[in-house]
Amino acid sequence: MKTLCIPKQQNVLKTCMAFGMVLILSLVTTTVNAQETERTVTGQVTSTDGVVPAATVLLKGTYIGVVCDDDGKFTFPQKLKENDVLVVTSLGYKDREIKITGNMTYIEPFLDDIPLVIIAALRTKATVPPSDIEKN
Amino acid sequence: MRRYLLLVFFTFIQFLQAQQSDFKNIDFTKAENNAERYKGEELTNLPILAHHLTYTLDTDVERFRAIYYWVCHNIKGEYGMMLKNNRKRQKLKDNPEALHAWNHEFKRKVFKKLINDKETLCTGYAYLIKELSRLAGLECKIINGYGLDGSLKSKNLEMPNHSWNVIKLNGKWYVCDATWSSGFTDVTTELFEFDYDNSYFLMDPSVFIKTHQPEDEAWTLLPQKL
């Protein structure tokens, strides 16, 4: 019977090489994954009244963002990855947060109305000390 | 002893009434300079505007001062819209559904006008103050009530006609009215003129009540009647 005898030194070398291969492979895979998930996100902001012009879309926790055009459309200026959160704000609506998931590249944030009763009383006189107002 | 107690009582009342003089040791120059630096900024990116106005300031009252000062020096009153809204609200006052529909439609127009032309009504001023404050991490509310300008008396008004703000600073609520601080409209020409009146900024509630009666009495910020 023939005994397969591998010298000890060669054995260690093989293990090292295998380990190295796994390491390189895992690094490459991570890079490829990251490239796959980073994407340009576009969208259109809407409400019950249709499209919302000039809303602001910001990456949560930063001041990186974009102002939508007159049709409520935008292209986010930075590539986004999974779990990034966009915050959409516009005067007269509640804020809306959108979490980027899966392969999402197009979003349609819907802004809810705010309950606000419009009333009006403007000042019609130049500055008068408050104590004199009663005399008028 | 009685005199002493009275003195303590009045000192306590004075302490309770939150007003501008609470911050007399604070220099607002830096806050006002921030507001000047960003004069003419657009309203399309409010988070950035709130950030620019406030990020160099150390205290909440300075941050609020920068916001208030900016709004009062950049937003104009729109007299035509005010008349139109008042007429319509008066006409529809007994028809809640129609009033609601009018308000919804008019609200969109008000915000469009505010964003595009920086012109608005008191609700627009109060809302903008509230939003910028929120974005700067401050607690601020809109208060609706009766604005008594000159001859107007609340008993003649069937519905609230005015909005202003209350702002929480160092744990205390303060009153202010950006609409009446910013300027006035000449009724003959219907043209707005900036005429900053600082007295409505964190005004003493006992003076404020003479011209501003909130719908909800709690927001007079006066000591509750016993």
Image (tube, coloured by chain):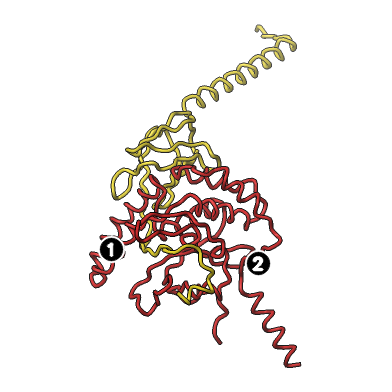
Chain colours: A yellow, B red
Residue located 40% across and 34% down the image: A104
Residue located 53% across and 71% down the image: A130
Query: Mark 1, chain letter?
Result: B
> Looking at this view, is B147 or A43 the one in front?
B147
Left or right: residue B194 compared with residue A117: right
* Residue farthest along the bottom direction in this orientation: B2
**Image: B221 above or below A115:** below
Left or right: residue A45 compared with residue A20: left
Q: Tell me which amino acid carries mark 1.
A: His
- Marks counted in the figure total 2
**Are callouts 1 and 2 both on one chain?**
yes
Could you give the CA–CA distance between mark 1 and mark 2, rounded to whole angstroms?
41 Å
Residue located 51% across and 22% down the image: A32
**Image: B91 above or below A15:** below
**Image: B172 above or below A3:** below
First in residue order: circle 1 vs circle 2: 2
Q: Which residue is mark 2?
A: B21
Q: Examine the image and state in which quarter residue B2 appears.
A: bottom right
**Disc 1 to disc 2: CB gap under 8 Å:** no
Residue located 65% across and 49% down the image: B30
Q: Position of residue B37 (x, y in %)?
A: 57, 43
* Residue farthest along the right direction in this orientation: B1
Badge 2 local density, few (<14 within 10 Å), some, or many (20+)?
Answer: few
Q: Which residue is mark 1?
A: B100
**Image: A30 above or below B60:** above
* Residue farthest along the top direction in this orientation: A2
